[in-house]
Amino acid sequence: MSVAIITGASSGIGREFARQMKEGLGVTEFWFIARREDKMRELAEELSVDATVISADLATSEGIEAVRAALSEKKPSVKYLINAAGFGKFGSFDQIDESAVSGMIDVNAKALVLITHMTIPYMERGGRIVQLGSGSCFTPLPYFNVYSSSKVFVLHYTKSLNHEIKKYGLRATCLCPGWVETEFLGAATDRPDVTVPKAMKPLLTKEYVVKKCLVAMKRGRTMCVINWYTRLQHLLFKILPDSILTKTWLGMLKHPEDSFKGVQEPKEEK
């Protein structure tokens, strides 16, 4: 039986992928990978699917090796890999703790690559991979520097990977949405009372984002850019200097050194 592996499955976009893949693609066997085991077991019960639940912090080598060991032991036939784990922190370079900086790189980039590399040998021809990118990868973003830079890596990695996995009959899609409404909108700064600036609204729903991504995934598209604002951002990235794009970004923020510390990019569970 074909398996769908989803990282970041305990909440947000990862959890929504499981729901829609069960309904729309008929997937009945999942591997859920995240830190919160109880949330993943609740999801498996809600969907009435066979699920292998792996509680792992993908920012650590122990978490990565737990996934590798499970693959080696069970040798699943994988049809879909959804790398939805990741997180972001707002603030200037001197405001964000080094452990958070390291964690963003480890989860958003390093873990994504390692999980992909270790899973591909178990994937069927015709298999599909989704990597969670971001609309932030199209513009240099002060005060969101490390997160957006990690997503630039994801986009370029996905584009290059497609050339390498073509011979195996596989395709990868980088999902680049705009701002998505999730339960984590305040967690990046430990200020859950803070909301996204009006200039960044309306927020996309995770249901809409996943629905659009699944269509792009099935068609084998390399990139899935969602909502008019992000598509415009992608277009302007190609024709305008970085300085103008960055100035526009900063213009959306009233006082970036202060008030922006309380605003968070949607993030997914590790």
Image (tube, rainbow, N blue to C red):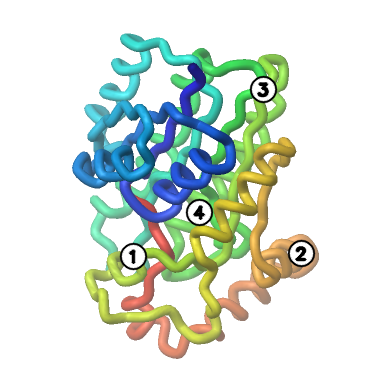
Label 3 neighbourhood size at 10 Å, few (<14), some (14-19), many (20+)?
some
| Residue that badge 3 annotates | 126
Disc 1 vs disc 2: which is toward the camera? 1
| Picture disc at residue 235 | 2
Dot 1 falls on a residue whose secondary structure is loop
Name the amino acid, label 2.
Leu
Mark earlier in primary sequence (1, 4): 4
Disc 1 to disc 2, how far (Cα)? 30 Å
Disc 4 vs disc 2: which is toward the camera? 2
**Residue, far left:** 38
Q: Is residue 53 visible?
A: yes
Mark earlier in primary sequence (4, 2): 4
Name the amino acid, label 1.
Glu
Which image quadrant is residue 25 in?
top right
| Picture disc at residue 149 | 4
Mark earlier in primary sequence (2, 3): 3
Residue drawn at point x = 54 percent, y = 50 percent: 133
Dot 4 falls on a residue whose secondary structure is helix
Disc 3 to disc 1, how far (Cα)? 33 Å
**Residue, far right:** 239
Label 4 neighbourhood size at 10 Å, few (<14), some (14-19), many (20+)?
many
Q: Where's residue 153, x and y in %? A: 54, 44
Residue nearer the viewer, 226 or 154: 226
Residue nearer the viewer, 100 or 203: 203
Disc 2 vs disc 3: which is toward the camera? 3
Q: Residues at badges 1 and 4 in contact (C-beta under 8 Å)?
A: no
Name the amino acid, label 4.
Ser
Label 2 neighbourhood size at 10 Å, few (<14), some (14-19), many (20+)?
few
Label 1 neighbourhood size at 10 Å, few (<14), some (14-19), many (20+)?
few
Disc 4 to disc 2, how far (Cα)? 18 Å
| Picture disc at residue 183 | 1
